[in-house]
Amino acid sequence: MIARTLLRRGSGAALTWETHWLPVGRKDVSLRVLLRRLLPAPAKPQRAVLLVPGANSSCETFTIPGGGLAAYLAARGADVWMLDWRASPLVLNTLLERSLPSGAAVDEERRAFTLDRIVAEDLPAALTFIRQSMGGGRLAVHGHCVGGGGLATAIARGILEPFDVDRVVLSTLGLFYEVPWNTWIKAEDFLLENMTLAPEWRDCRAIDPRRPSAWPEMFGHAYGRWPAPWLPERGARSDEFLRQLSFMVGQPYSPDKLDPTIRGAPVEGVFGALHLGLYMHLGQMVRRGYSAPFNVRDQIDRARLKRGRSARSAPRGDFFPARFAPYHITLVAAGDNGVWHRDSIDLMYEWLLRRPGARCEKYVIPECNIQELYWAPEAPTKTYDLFARALAC
Amino acid sequence: MNDQPGGTRVIVIGSGFGGAVAACRLAQAGFEVTILERGRRYRQGDFPNLPQDSALLPEERRWSWSLDQGLWEVLDLEEIVSIQAAGLGGGSLVYANVHLRPPKSVFSAEWPVRHQGRAGLDPYFDLVASMLEVAPVSAHPQFHGEIVKSAQFGAAAAQLQRSVFYPPLAIRYEGEGTNAHGVPQGKCTGCGACCGGCPQSAKNTLDLNYLAIAERHGARVVTQCEVLGLVETADGDWMVRCFDHLEAQKRTFRAPHVFLCAGAVHSTRLMSQAQLLNGARAGARPRPVKALVGTGYFPGGDSLGVVYDTAHPQRPSVGPAISTATVQWSLKDPTSFFMLQDGGYPAPVDRLVGVLRASAWLERNKRSKSGTANVRRTRTRQRLLGRPAVPFPTTRAPSCADDLLRAYSAGAFGEVVPSQLRALKDQFSEQLSGPLVLSAVVAETIRGGILFRWGWLGGLARFVASVGMRLARVLLGNERSLGVRAVRVLLDGGRLKVEDLAAQVGGYDGAKSQHRAVLLGMGRDAALGVLQYDRRRKRMVADLNLVKLTPGYTEQECLMTDIARELGGELRTNPAWEYRRKPVTVHNQGGCGMSDDPAHGVTDAFGKVHGCEGLYILDGSILCRSVGVNPSATIAALSECGVLEFIRAHKPNWPDQSAGGQEYERQRRLAAAWAAVASAERWDLEPPGPVPRPLRATGAAAPTQTVPIGLELSERLRGYYQETKSRPSDPSAYLALETRGRPHWPVELNLNLRVDNLAAFFEDPEHLVDVTGTVDIRLPGREESSRYVISQGRIKLFVRVHKDYAIGDEEKARLRAQQRASEGQYASVRAERGERRMTYSMSFNDEAGRAWTLHGFKRIASASSLDAWRQTSILCLALSGEDPQGGASVIRGGGAVHVDLNGFLYQQLPSVRATGTDDPVRAAWAVSEFTAFFFGTLQRIYLPALRAAARAPSARSRLEQSEP
């Protein structure tokens, strides 16, 4: 299906997109994900780039302010594609408006929203479509936040191999899931798992940062008790949204450091509900500290780890260094990341360097939170250029 | 890649000054090198953020090795705290860039012949210096001119008739771009952040030279891979067992050759736990070399002081961490010296540096500005010296004990609780209904307390505790909700302004932050200790001879005080040393010392472990004697020397025509050129010797103006004795003789007890006290009493320190090795229990010049606490003098003398006063420390049950079982 749409840019200019709703998933939960191509597309694209957003954010991450990274890459001659996968609010909101199909188990829907299924189904669908559209040109992928984590997982599992991708940018996340300690203790408390044990919340499907009144009681209580110093300061209405979002995933941006044209509602519109399947999977990986399939039994025994003994009984599922060999990988960390600890990138870098002949670079952007990599006033000079070079645009 | 693929496999454990050098040379020579490094790889911008207001959360895990393999590792070695780095580049990532070589006199006969006199090592020192492009700040006058702290340090030294020198530093002063080894580097901006990781990559750390070359020649670097053990296999290989922190699993590496370069502490640990076969690689008998591992350890005499409120700005955050130094040579030992160096720190840690003067330390670690009573009159001090709060006899001169008692009784020390913390506590109390919390706390205290051992009283206490806990639960909720509320109050209260918090808790005064000078001391250790793995504690422990080391620390402190006085500020020293007498070191050395004789050392002159084919140690652990200077240059030079020997054993023609060989040859030529420049420029490559230079005291043995803090008190004992020809058998026999001697054979001792160095006294296992004074006695054969002046006297007070981790008598080989390493100064004091004594020895001469000696002892035994006063106040005496029948000294009498209660309370206690300081605060603390030592020891002897009960789990568990 091909359609055309216009999206308003923060500055008032417009980006034109070619949109494609691609069917993905299995029989249990059938879905459609949104793939967009920035128009006008180059007549003979030499370089196509697929942008993949974070967990509960849409691809508008890459289009604001003033066209954002997408417009910047297009101006450098790239054929820019963006994937709003099933976790994106643009896709998930529609699903959540419908109740579960009669007889469908909520557990099945949660499994469908784990990162395992997302990378196994959404990414190949998008890349297959892009390859068919562009033919034999060079293809690069750029994942931000959980998008980066998803791409790294896809590489580790060999999912990207058929698509002849040559360059990969992992922004703030790879196979290592390190978080600041305030998020870590929340994961260690098994807050989500305990919440779903309560009969009235057993069927909870997603948690929306803009609707705290609909939060499960236990989740709301935890938010009420959360130490004030760990949340952004209270102030305007938009700051209240930021506090709720920060409690869910960590603080993703500092309002006073954003481009002035997008403060407030435009930024809020990027984020949406986080499906509990993905949320719980991320929680598991945060507890482990590394990427692994949902519900696998290789939980790290931290007591054994402290004693310097082997912490696992089974091999780590997603760690296959050889599968990273064909790619030129660029890792980017935000120095003041409030969602993921910069160790997520640093450890990934050291791990990749162990490969003989590794083609890997790492950049740390100082005084910058995770979304400010794209939304800061100085982003075009500070990060867009770096991304463009890393993607060979 | 390797010049010779498939070359001999070598594993290098660690990437510090030993490992990086070894790996580089081995890779150049075509060996197949694997470097195992437990820490991370740090590049420009990777070092953990310094605490700034803008930081959302502190990067604690990147700072701390124990939290998450961060940059710094802090190890509690029981008698010393060791701070070291973990990361690719080892200590070079955080050291202060100083590359001094030890004076030639340091390389004495204890070193292998090859290194004695240092001449054989000098080319390697040059090679290291050239590789690291070292130069003193004085070689860059414009850069140097901006370093205020250097100029101020020099001016203060000049006032003291001392001069300073500028040690060579491994810093890129000028020119950005690639260095001589093709690695991009920035230039020094003088931000002072050297010890937290250089943000500009201007430090010539090892990853920018040696390790970069090694990787270029194909060395494989495995970071975050912590070595757990070494196993010698029967087929001639070494198996290195590791824990891979990135993969979270164990890994094993094998190679015929292993270079252990993990630093003094960890190399010693790995060696002591290594599984070694005997020479035939069969059987499992441990090698004799293991008995030597851990002996001969020394901490490098490190000390730290901060001078606050200097008269002129010091700008401690401008310039490299160290740029200038002065040296003090010993008056007694011509090979012994220590150095003071000007320290620096980056601006963001400004608030933390105030911590040494925080109120919490009760000003104990303060030396006043002038060394006199000219101290700031804080409220605490006004209370301390103000109106007397308790009536006290006024017929005698006030003493420091008065000050102390007044301070305690007036609650003066309550003033030092920071107001912000008091406010927090008030808020906490208010929210938790104060008194009820108190009752809960009391109940909890009783619950875990000592009363449970005491029969019916224990039952009563249990009842009270139970009621208290129930009451608290009813009114406040259970412990869980109590805890939640407490945490909330603390966290909400945590929104204090950083400046306020730093000021209140950390002693920070922002207006004067530029008026601070950091002083770093290091020197030759006077004694060698033992470093060993303690199986009970499951960690390494250091058994140090602090008796011998303490005077060195005190000397450094005295020179620091001199400099502080000249700078017009007040000195604060390391609280860990002041409070717990636990030094902090960043320069661990020894433990696997080198020697030509396998019976005396773990390795040979080139780091090869005696009797272990294929195992080499090249790091600070192989230093067999204290070098006195920052040891990095020495370690790197020894490594250059050792690895060259290894390579030539395998490749006699090295350096050959391979790319690596030519590169090495070129680097040696550059080293010769560097040495020529250093000589022409007259750089101080080593501390100036004790030869007078333009200023009198450049390295000259000039005594410091400040003397150590001591203590003196007087004691009067009176009693009787009776002539006897044999030494009485036990205290009761002495008392019987005293009874028989009344009233005709009186003895009265008026003693002045003096301790010149209180810190050394505490560390001394015998606690020696000098005694002067008089003896009034009717000597045998005389009709009347006469007064004699004591010509020589001393008291051994109490007991030796009990160390359950000292080398036991049963470990004969190990004990012999340590005795040899410490030149006979090591004494095993393990497992000492039971009776303790205070012994007195006083010699005097009568009118005819005949020598007499009074030997006395007080028997201190824990049999019954009711005997405490009696045992500590009775001195059993034996009088010895010339035998009337011949010349030899024999027992002439025996008896006892007593301290009476009145004299003790109104004469002896008030006579206690501190010496070496006129600062009443310091003096009060000296007295406090002594009384805490004296009465604390008595308490430990007489009330052991108290301590045992306090930590008895059984009482607590009994109560918990009884709780519903």
Image (cartoon, helix red, strand yellow):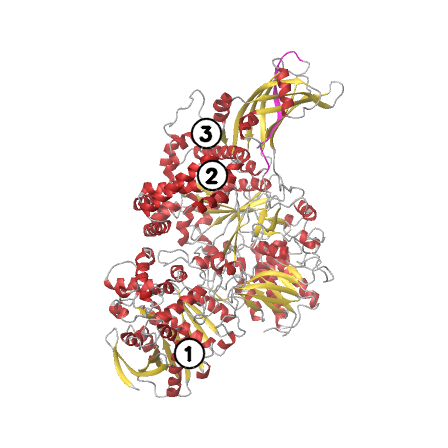
- Give how far across and how far down residue B138 sits, in percent: 50, 53
Hey, what amino acid is under mark 1? Ala
Q: In the image, is B846 to the left or to the right of A91?
A: right
Q: How many marks?
A: 3
Cα separation between marks 1 and 2: 64 Å
Give the structural element (helix, strand or loop) at label 1: helix
Query: Mark 2 falls on what kind of element?
Result: helix
Amino acid, disc 3: Cys
Q: Give the structural element (helix, strand or loop) at label 3.
A: helix
Q: From the image, tell me which residue sits under label 1.
A: A120
Q: In terms of depth relative to the viewer, which is nearer, B261 or B540? A: B540
Tag 1 and tag 3, C-beta contact below 8 Å: no
Give residue B452's mark.
Answer: 2
Q: Is residue B784 part of the magenta span, yes or no? A: yes
Q: Are marks 1 and 2 on the same chain?
A: no
**Which residue sits at x=47%, y=75%?**
A156
Tell whether label 2 touches label 1 (CB within 8 Å): no
Magenta range is B782-800
- Asked if marks 1 and 3 fall on the same chain, the answer is no
Tell me the quarter of the picture where residue B287 sits. bottom right
Residue beneath label 3, please? Answer: B400
Provide residue B289's location: percent of width, then percent of height: 69, 54
Q: Nearer the viewer, mark 1 or mark 3?
A: 1
